[in-house]
Amino acid sequence: MDAPTTTSGENGIAGGGGWFTPRKVPPAPPPEGDQETAEGRRPAVVRPVGRPSREAAARPAPDASAAPPTPAAPAAQPAGPFAPAPPGPPAPRPAGAFEPSPPTFGSTAPQRVPPQRPAPPVEEASPDAVVIRRTMAEIAPLADKVTSYFYALLFVRHPDLRPMFPPAMDTQRDRLLRALLTAAEHIDNTPVLVDYLQNLGRGHRKYGTRAEHYPAVGECLIGALSKYAVAVWSPETEAAWVRTYTTISQVMIDAAAADGLRAPAWWHAEVVTHDLRTPDVAVLTVRPDQPYPFLAGQYTSVETPWWPRVWRHYSFASSPRSDGLLTFHVKAVPAGWVSNALVHRARPGDVIRLGPPTGSMTIDHTTDSGLLCLGGGTGIAPIKALVEDVAEHGRRRTVEVFYGARTGHDLYDMDTMLRLQQSHPWLSVRAIIDQQAHLQLPDVIREYGPWNEYDAYLSGPPGMIRSGVDALRDIGIPSDRIRHDSVEELVVVGN
């Protein structure tokens, strides 16, 4: 989700300035301080680049035939029917906070989601959560109609908000509503919900979203739900949604206010170099107009001058550099407005805009665990950044990289990975070419290992992430040691 949010004023109580009126409380000051394989059908599927792993070397040759602590949750039951949740001190920007894929007010590294981690056990759903899920089940078959009606209400009742959305709504029409409903559905999953919402609140700043915009979205959200969930709608249902939205919006408002004390809403960045590696993959290096702090493995949102208010996510392809430059790997995809502009139109001297950094696929440097890294297509970008991060910290941790592509031609950054391998004896890189191997990247890792003492990192297309997580769990890597920022929906988190 990436835009403001609100409930229907059709039959609500308008006292106190209207529903979802944000608190006028100043924030506390911040604390100091695309996937694929090689010849053969098993490990012959893997084209080893350089030396084999120690475990693979000891194994007989194969048969050729064969996510920082979460702040306390906001109160679930506001003091009054439409009162915002009681304030808590705004939390500092977590290194692993989540910003969903294309934002709602106006945004392709892979689409993002927090890392897989078990949801806290919930013995019994709260009354509001039961009502919310009943509503969700009712509107599921009518999602397109609900979405269209929601935006119709928003733009008719609040025409001043229309400029905050991209001129053409077809590529992100459902994202705002989908994100709102997803957050509502996770109202009982405090750690996931709060991380998610705080990231959204920070990310919304780049669209010009302010606290006073939230009531309008909430009003239209309830208006759309009440029209299409008639069979289950009642005063009690509306009250549950008011409480839920109030909680959601207040977390986002507080996070945005706290972030405004420490960082700009966006950065301008000039394109310094543009290297077209393949007909549809470019490596861009940009220079931000002011310091841009981030961690290796994170990503950001990018807006081009050719498609205002359309943002897409891209991973940083290096660890932080002393010269302050940032590098991105971009693959042009069909109908991809931003990706095609960056690959085929951008040139040195052009200026783009960057949102804040986010993402949880970062390294814990307090441990000595080995790293198992799977990078599919342009997903190799954050993997390369992680390798550089390990090298810069000077600790000899074993790093095993599996680089997947559909064809050998798609291994556009293999030379870079080879140079890194030659420089660092603790690094091993293997190319996985799907069309030659007839196996996909996640399946290949089963032929190597053991991996139970490794921390796993995955980056690539959503399908690869899903199958990769399953494969890693199957071979014994606990869920809390599997990190990624890709999949399409927050809904998968905690499942």
Image (spheres, grey):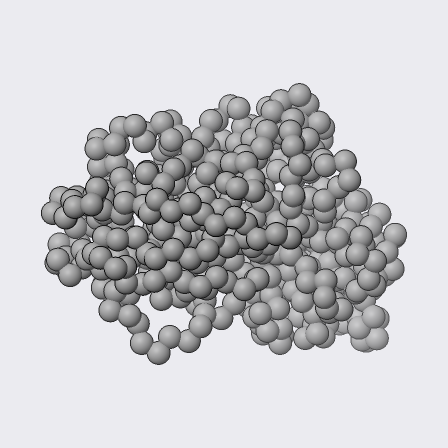
How many numbered markers are drawn?
A: 0
Apparent side of residue 6 relative to residue 323 in the rendered image (left or right): left
Residue 45 x, y percent position in the rendering: 71, 61
The vertical placement of 178 against 373, above or below, is above
State the residue at coordinates (42%, 49%). Answer: 254
Residue 160 x, y percent position in the rendering: 30, 28
Apparent side of residue 85 relative to residue 374 in the rendered image (left or right): left
State the residue at coordinates (72%, 68%). Answer: 367
Residue sitting farthest toward the top: 349
Is residue 61 visible to us here?
no
Residue 34 x, y percent position in the rendering: 59, 47
State the residue at coordinates (42%, 76%). Answer: 121
Apparent side of residue 359 relative to residue 422 in the rendered image (left or right): left
Image quadrant where residue 126 sits = bottom left
- Asked whether 220 or 93 is in front, the reply is 93
Image quadrant where residue 106 sits = top left
Residue 442 x, y percent position in the rendering: 62, 62
